[in-house]
Amino acid sequence: MWRQSEHLHRQLTQRYHVLRKLNYALTRRKKNRETLEHQRDMACLDYLDYSLRLHKKAVKTLSLLKRRAVESKDLEQLSYFLKQAGRHINLVMRRVICNEYIPHSEKLFSLFEPHTEWINKGKAGVPVELGLRVCVLQDQFGFTLHHQVMEQQTDDQVAISMALGARAMFSSLQQVSFDKGFWSPANYAALVTEFTRIILPKKGRRTAEEKAREDHLEFKRGKRKHSAVESDINALEHHGLDKCPDHGIDGFKRYVAMSVLASNIHRLGNLLLQDELEADRRKKKRLLKQPYPADHAA
């Protein structure tokens, strides 16, 4: 089978291109769609049948190698990809031929990084993103105090763990600020008993008491400070968090931690540089105030 790998791959690719062209034509044509749909389904069945035959041959070869006690990382990778191939043959059959709705939990968005998630932020111009969410908690000076990689989690599910995790490392932390995405009644009830001041706007309609709380001067002041987090997130992206080159979920978490550390070191360097510039400015101002002897030219 492996001696014919190029030929087999070419045969599979040809079937894929036939299916792709028929599917594209189906999206463009408004008349005679039934005939085209039938041709598309038959091409899909041919593609799946050929894929399944290759899959069975590969599984048989892999089992022979394992019985011969051949150990290799390549065999581990092959076993993983064969498993995913069988899974996606089943998904394509269910979706295209059986016209079945595939639950989101069964979908895989990256064969090489299976932890990748489909992220829909709802922002204009950015319909969806592929990756993992990372939640960061920063102080008023721009330092990241705590971060968390969110695996199959949303903002409202990490609010409590983020706040308590940060205070476990910084016991003097008494105020936390979140945006509306972190709101839930349970989050507010838990955080209000742990911190002196909570900036957590409510989603949806507010009662008179909640409106009065959010109209308070201290609440508005804390909410305005929270807007600086957007620029800090942009700074994190410039320190490596825009794209992770490491592989695996452990590599992703390690790379995120290193990016946070790099950003904090850079922020510290900026503050030290500002102190030096301010000291030089004061020194220059002091020297300019000193009296200098007049120039008595002959």
Image: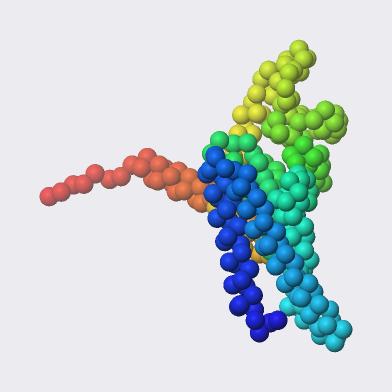
- Residue 235 picture location, percent across and down: 56, 48
Q: Is residue 106 left or right of residue 20?
A: right
- Residue 12 picture location, percent across and down: 63, 68
Q: How is the image coloured?
A: rainbow
At 61% from the left edge and 71% from the top edge, which residue is drawn?
Answer: 11
Report if residue 139 is visible in the image.
Answer: yes
Report if residue 163 is visible in the image.
Answer: no
User: As drawn, which residue projects farthest toward the top?
Assistant: 208
At 85% from the left edge and 31% from the top edge, which residue is drawn?
Answer: 186
- Residue 26 picture location, percent across and down: 57, 47
Above or below 182: residue 18:
below
At 72% from the left edge and 64% from the top edge, which residue is drawn?
Answer: 49
Q: Is residue 228 left or right of residue 176?
A: left
- The count of marks equals 0
Above or below 231: residue 78:
below
Q: Which of 200/247 is in front? A: 247
Above or below 237: residue 244:
below
Q: Which of 10/254 is in front? A: 10
Q: Which of 148/271 is in front? A: 148
Q: Is residue 263 left or right of residue 148?
A: left
User: In the picture, residue 157 is in which quadrant?
Assistant: top right
Q: Which of 5/109 is in front? A: 5
Above or below 196: residue 72:
below
User: As drawn, which residue projects farthest toward the left?
Assistant: 298
* Viewport quadrant of the N terminus: bottom right
At 85% from the left edge and 87% from the top edge, which residue is drawn?
Answer: 68
- Residue 151 picture location, percent across and down: 76, 50
User: As drawn, which residue projects farthest toward the bottom?
Assistant: 68
